[in-house]
Image: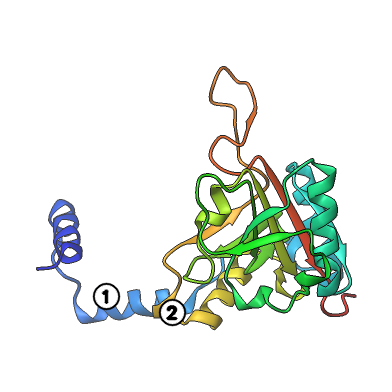
Amino acid sequence: MSARDKILDRIRRNLGRGPLDEAAATVVRERIAGHKRNLVPARTDISPGRQVNLLQDKLEALAATVVRVPSLKEVPGQVRDYLSNHNLPSQIKMSPSPSLDEIPWGDVPMLEITRGAAVITDEVSITPAFGAIAETGTLCMASGPETPSTLNFLPENHIAVLKSSDIQGSFEQAWDSLRRKYGEAELPRTVNFISGPSRTADIEQQLIMGAHGPRRLHIVIVEDEQKA
């Protein structure tokens, strides 16, 4: 018996229930496959252009910074300016994701970029965002060999590149996008939802930034298609 089967068997015993009969199992399978919606806030049912605006408003309210650019070619200059404005080093650990290969990093030679997972000495990371949820101002980050989760949490400064076409209104829509890309059985091992820089007020009710992750979160939104 596998570890999974042992855990499920223990849960059944504690509930005083054996394995489901076929009729009950069919109901469960249909419910899982159906992804039935519950209550979804009305503010998510808005035009794509308003979704971008809502996302930016929510992120900035959560102490993240946001800049919008018309194309990928403006990204390196925005990264350079961000590093300069915050007196940060030009050494960057960047995700090996091919989606970032389209960006002309060579246009700003002062940026010293290495690719791979983050280590404790990295101060700045750049990653793509799988998507974002306008409803709450949240980035959706899917883990994998090309998008190591360490880049989201170890460096104190996290820069995320987000295409406006990947912004969704609600969490339900974000999960739909994940299922479309990966398939139900091949979802990423980890999906991180990030709303602003890391913070905590657990210690004497004092707000501390960067307690469990980046002290700063900066999002570059690339408006890759017309948003009305």
Instruction: Kindly state the secondary structure of the residue where label 2 is placed.
Output: helix
Residue found at x 45% / y 70%: 188
Residue 104 location, quadrant: bottom right
Residue under circle 2? 184
Q: Position of residue 97 (x, y in %)?
A: 59, 73
Q: Position of residue 153 (x, y in %)?
A: 55, 49
Viewer-side residue, 77 vs 194: 77
Q: Is residue 57 above or below residue 160?
A: above
Viewer-side residue, 122 vs 141: 122
Residue found at x 66% / y 56%: 92
Viewer-side residue, 196 vs 41: 196
CA–CA distance in space, label 2 to label 1: 21 Å
Residue under circle 1? 24
Instruction: Kindly state the secondary structure of the residue where label 1 is placed.
Output: helix
**Quadrant, the N terminus:** bottom left
Q: Label 2 is placed on what type of residue? A: Glu
Q: Seen in the image, is 87 located left or right of residue 156?
A: right
Residue found at x 19% / y 56%: 11
Q: Label 1 is placed on what type of residue? A: Ala
Residue 47 appears in the picture as rendered: no
Residue 39 location, quadrant: bottom right
Q: Seen in the image, is 56 located left or right of residue 5?
A: right
Q: Position of residue 216 (x, y in %)?
A: 70, 43
Q: Is residue 105 above or below residue 9?
A: below
Residue found at x 34% / y 74%: 28
